[in-house]
Structures are given as C-alpha cells and as structure tokens.
Amino acid sequence: MQIIRHHRLPVNRPLALTIGNFDGVHLGHQILIRQLRQEAQTRGWDSAAMTFEPHPVTVLAGKPAHRIEGVRKKIQQLAATGLEILYLPRFNKRFASQSAKEFTSFLFTQLAVRHLVVGEDFRFGQGRQGDVTMLKKAAAAHGATVLGAELLWSGDAPISSGRIREYLRAGNFIAAAQLLGREWVLDGRVVRGEGIGRRLGFPTANLRLNFVPVCSGIFAGDTVIDGVRYPAAVSIGNNPTVQNSSLVRAEAHVLDFDGNLYRRRLTVQLFEKLRDEEKYNNLEQLRAAIADDVKTVRQRFDHRTKAGY
C-alpha cells in the first residue's frame, strides 16, 4: 500500500476513495473497503482511503483523542484490506479552515476521484458545512458518483468505533473483539521508566504508545515472549500514587519472566478488567494492592489455561 502524506503530490489517476477516521478498522470498515475495492477493480481504478492525523479532536478541541488503536496499527490494518493507496494528510487548523467547496474541488479535480464512499452522516469543510448531498452535486459535475453508506449492524446496534470504545471502557474485550474481527491488544516498544515497580518488587515493562487508550485501570492479561505465553498484570493510566501528571502510561508486570525487555516490542492481550486505578497514601499500600492484583492475575491465567484459552 502506497502512503501519501501531506508533503507529497497527489496521485492523479482515477480513484475509488473512502474517507473516515477508521478508528479500529472494524468489521464495518472492512466490508465497506472490500466493496470499494471490488468497484475499483471492475472499473480499472485504484482503491484508496483517506484518514487524518493528528486526530481532528486533538486539533479542534485541544484535547487528546481516546482511541481504539494508534496510527501505526491503523495503517497496518488498512494495508491488510488490500487497499492500494492511503492518503494521510496532516490535519491542522489550516486544513480545517478549508471551505466545503475547496475540499470537494480537491477531491474531484486534484485527486481524480471517480467513486467516493463516506458515512451517511459525513460532514466536512469549515464549520462542517458540507454533507453527502453537497458531495453528490459536486461529483455529478465531474462524472463521479458518491455513496453515503449506512452503518452495518451486529445484533440490535450498529457496528461502530464508538460502540467498540464503550466495550473497551467497560472491559468487555470479547464483545470488542467480535466487532473488530480480531483481538484487541496493546502493542508498543518497551522503554525505560522510573523504576518504581522494580523497587516495589514488581518490575514493569513500560510500553511506548503513540495514542491514548480508551480504557484505563488494572487488567489481567498475557503476553508471548520468545514463544512462551506469560500472565501479565497491566496498568493503564497516570499512576496517581507516584506521579502528579495527566500523562497516560501502559505498564505490564510479566509474571514468571526473568529477562531484559528493554527496547523490545511487546504485545499484551487483555482479557479482564480487575479494578479502576486508585491513589494510595503511601508506597506500602500500593505494594499490597499490586500483590493482590498479581495473585488475581495468576488465578485468572491458570483458569483460562485449563479452559483451553
């Protein structure tokens, strides 16, 4: 998949394009992209997606966007769909200030879009003035077509990134995985922390994440290192007992593992939320709470192992 960022010229050949945040690249996204690719192949066009970084909420609202996955994982998942091109323009205030008319001209003139697929409630342009009706009128003037796609449903509710985020906040990782079409995992390179976990007797692998996870708290999980699966007690949050910061961190205490994980990439699967983060009066109280969490994680891991998970 060719990735075209903001500093590169667009590919000026006929495109079938879809636009969205694609947070999680869930089953609904995957089916939509599969249909887009089929249309492109029939017509002899390239298939492409456009998504934006940083997340528009970060720029427009000035606050971090809590996401299902980071941009690195999103690119991997979009590439796995078979798309040929990914447009990844930098979303900034200048980009956001484009009028709806300017954006439609960019799509149908510069990018040579011949078929566009967006959500039926898609809004764009300064002040969110543009909608699907406007896109269809602009497309018709260029001999192109626009599809305002309806949400796909699973059970009694649509498949959506918002629904998946709700499941992750609640610790319902099974339901989230069903809508994602895969297990949700934390993935990051291990970086040096402050060593507090080690001083407490529970050394942690600090994962460098390129996004703010939607869930927080203390979790039971596991990870595979050199082909061996280990239980892991995972903390996602801002460690209120030992730091006065809003910085969100992800740390994993890997049980029964004695080795150096520094600079290695670690993938941790969570399977149960144990509790919310708490602020303790001192480090001894924190040590006791971690010891209880580790005991619970081992019990949960053993139970899952015996059950064949």
Image (tube, rainbow, N blue to C red):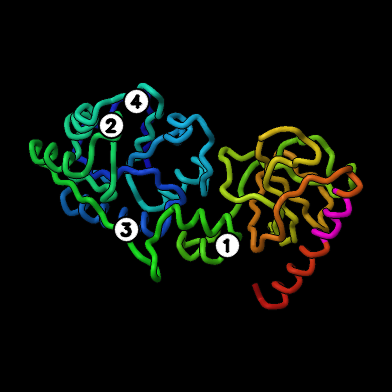
Specify whether residue 288 is painted magenta: yes
SS for dot 4: helix
SS for dot 3: loop
Q: Nearer the viewer, residue 89 or 294?
A: 294
- Image quadrant in which the C terminus is located: bottom right
SS for dot 2: loop
In the image, what residue type sits under mark 4? Answer: Phe
Tell me the number on the disc at residue 125: 2
In the image, what residue type sits under mark 3? Answer: Leu
Other residues around mark 2 within 10 Å, as few (<14) / some (14–19) / many (≥20): some
In the image, what residue type sits under mark 2? Answer: Gly
Other residues around mark 4 within 10 Å, as few (<14) / some (14–19) / many (≥20): few
Sequence-wise first label, 4 or 1: 4
On the image, the x and y values in percent for residue 134 come to 17, 39
Q: Could you tell me if the residues under marks 4 and 1 are in contact, i.e. CB atoms within 8 Å?
A: no
Distance between the Cα atoms at labels 3 and 2?
A: 22 Å
Q: On the picture, is 78 further left or further right than 102?
A: right
Sequence-wise first label, 3 or 4: 4
Other residues around mark 1 within 10 Å, as few (<14) / some (14–19) / many (≥20): many
Quadrant of res 96: top left
Q: Nearer the viewer, residue 28 or 205?
A: 28
Q: Is residue 216 above or below residue 62?
A: below
